[in-house]
Amino acid sequence: MLATVLSGTVVGIDAHLVEVEVDLRHGMPYFTIVGLPDAAVKESKERVKAAIRNCGYLYPSNHRATVNLAPADIKKEGVGFDLPIAIGLLAGMGAVKPERLRDFLILGELSLEGRIKRTPGALPIALIAAERKLEGILLPRANAREAAVVKGLPVFPCDHLSEAVSFLNGTLELKPLALDLENLFRRASTYRVDFSEVKGQEHAKRALEVAAAGGHNVLLIGPPGSGKTMLAKRLPTIMPDLSFDEALETTKIYSVIGQVKEKEGLIAKRPFRSPHHTVSDAGLTGGGAVPRPGEISLAHNGVLFLDELPEFKKHVLEILRQPLEEGSVTISRAAMALTYPARFMMVAAMNPCPCGYLGDPMHACRCTSRQVSQYRTRISGPLLDRIDLHVEVPAVRYRELSDERSGDSSEAIRERVNRARKVQAERFREAKIFANAEMEPRHLKKWCQIDAAGHDLLQHCVDRLGMSARAHARILKVSRTIADLQGSEKISTAHLSEAINYRVLDRATL
């Protein structure tokens, strides 16, 4: 008897509908799975047979079972086909009524005793089920909240194979899971850290406010203990809240690697990723024998923090140049090429010299000029050009540390950032970009016009400091953001001067 069960597989971060066709006939005992299965899918036949027997069903020993995963030209990976294969076999044996199999998408790994276990990739597969207008999705309870964020799709969580069989036969009623998205976003808007906790560093805090308002990349330069990491960790608290579409796109990335928390279901807070400087190129950008998203994709719609920037391998840093420009990363293999989203704010931190105390009035620098030059050349010019703001973070003096007054809270700063982002959203509503940092030359020409005094100031700086054309464009973008924060339609020389002041490494010395 032939039975067909609907399931899905993930390629990159997108899902494809898979028809699990099970043909069960009398003959020599044999079980084969075809349709480009990987090793985990091939091993499912042993898990499925044990689960069927341990649930009290009689697995026929004199039958030939052939499982086809269609379409056959897409590689099938993972353990999520266990449950649909088991349901297909039971339908072929007459234990499951086939009438409802075309109405539901089924997904889940099986234990040997028949328990249905968590499976990566539930969210993108749920999205394809909603797109096909199916009556619902049957999947592990551990994945239920993750799938329930998809609007208009009934999600039926299931714990055991026998429970799934009873539901499909109509003898057991399962209630679809409902998720309160508003409450989820409300809880996500609270943070354990706040900008008011940072003592001093008003210049650096202002620079991070500008960066958050325009989506600009930042490099923090200062001696050890000056608060660079503390500032970076508080940047997500002043960034605009995630929209539902952004949260859905971010959660898809975490879903395919099984990192969505069971009790949350949706990543409603901007990610903050801080890889160690020993990270490999595959760890940062993604890759491997079975390509997986890397740190830059896990930071999508959030912050990628690179502490001790010169300590990263140079070839690893150079890989960042394409994602910083395009907002995505493409991983090419012999069999396929996958593109992962990677639109993030990069925040990097470094010391001004190898010992860390160049320019610090409280400590003597032990580095020679050659050592300082070699230290800084670990970061290439093209990469520095892609960082909009280079900001000094000097050591904090005692009177600032002991000051009981607190600066603006993250909430107050975020309100100003949101106002600036609303101006940009209205400005770029037809351009399909989200912030000033994403402007292209045609946008600069239209939205970053400056007067004669501004041209004279920029000409003086570009000629004197030898800035590249890309650095010139970055200054204009940052100037536009500063003007937006002040509610100004025009870019003044004051806005340009502040933006130029955020290009520390374009100067001869700090």
Image (cartoon, helix red, strand yellow):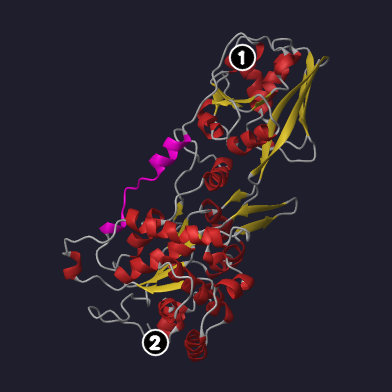
| Magenta span includes 115 | no
Check the image and report above or below for 167 versus 251: above
Q: CA distance from mark 2 to mark 1?
A: 74 Å
**Dot label at residue 369:** 2
The residue indicated by pointer 1 is 167
Q: Amino acid at mark 1?
A: Phe
Query: What segment is highlighted magenta in the picture?
Result: 181-197
**Dot label at residue 277:** none
Secondary structure predominantly adopted by residues drawn in magenta: helix
- Classify mark 2: helix, strand or loop: helix
Work out whether residue 280 can be spotted. no
2 and 1 marks in contact (CB < 8 Å): no
Residue 182 falls left or right of residue 45:
left
Classify 10 Å Cα crowding around label 1: few (below 14), some (14-19), many (20 and above).
Answer: some
Check the image and report above or below for 310 versus 37: below
Q: Amino acid at mark 2?
A: Ser
In this orientation, which residue lies closer to the viewer: 49 or 170? Answer: 170
| Magenta span includes 193 | yes
Give the residue at x 64% y 72%: 442
Location of the C terminus by quadrant is: bottom left
- Classify mark 1: helix, strand or loop: helix
- Where's residue 95, x and y in %? 69, 10
Classify 10 Å Cα crowding around label 2: few (below 14), some (14-19), many (20 and above).
Answer: few
Give the residue at x 47% y 74%: 479
Give the residue at x 37% y 86%: 368
